[in-house]
Image (cartoon, rainbow, N blue to C red):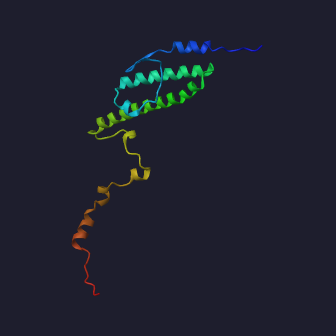
Amino acid sequence: MIQVRTSTSVQSKQEEMPERQSARGVDTYSAAKVKTFELRKKTKADLTKQLEDLKQELASLRVQKIAGGAASKLSKIHDVRKSIARVNTVISQTQREQLRIFYKAKKFLPLDLRPKKTRAIRRRLTVSEATRKTVKQQKRATHFPLRKYAVKA
């Protein structure tokens, strides 16, 4: 027995998708590539709302993929995933930026905000520690300075 799948299930899913209010008016739920510079201007509440919207859209696109959606919908999954990544990146970057401002006047920084470098460089003496001299070294330097010789050419 062969089952034939009709496109009514796909159409009903598209009808269920919410409509979104944009500056140009009402349009269907479309995820054009999210621009990072636009995301940086938004508040955290707006970013989290946009993240939830993008995740819902991704879920609906995956349902359409299973239901046998068009190729254009399948390629849209990639764009939505990348948009979600952009939003997450902007959220984490702004959060770290705020933490850096908060810890600027404090004595210690959290480990994830400290410069990474390498383990050897992190354990190395600082410039001030390396240039310090003991009392004996200071006395020797003052009492027995390096001799200067006049060399005949």
Which residue, as the protein is rendered here, is positioned at the far front? 24
Is 60 in front, or is 96? 60
Q: Is 87 situated above or below 23?
A: below
Quarter of image, res 150: bottom left
Residue 144, given in percent of the width and then of the height, sits at 24, 74
Point 45% across, 21% down: residue: 53
User: Quick check: 14 left or right of 86?
Assistant: right
Residue 86, given in percent of the width and then of the height, sits at 44, 32
Residue 131, given in percent of the width and then of the height, sits at 29, 60
Quarter of image, res 89: top left
User: Quick check: 131 left or right of 57?
Assistant: left
Q: Is 59 situated above or below 37?
A: above
Which residue, as the protein is rendered here, is positioned at the far left? 142
Point 60% across, 21% down: residue: 69
Which residue, as the protein is rendered here, is positioned at the far bottom? 152
Is 113 in front, or is 63? 63
Is 95 in front, or is 122? 95
Point 23% across, 68% down: residue: 139
Point 25% across, 79% down: residue: 148
Residue 44, given in percent of the width and then of the height, sits at 36, 26
Looking at the figure, which quarter contains the N terminus?
top right
Looking at the figure, which quarter contains the C terminus?
bottom left
Is 104 in front, or is 68? 68
Give the mark count: 0
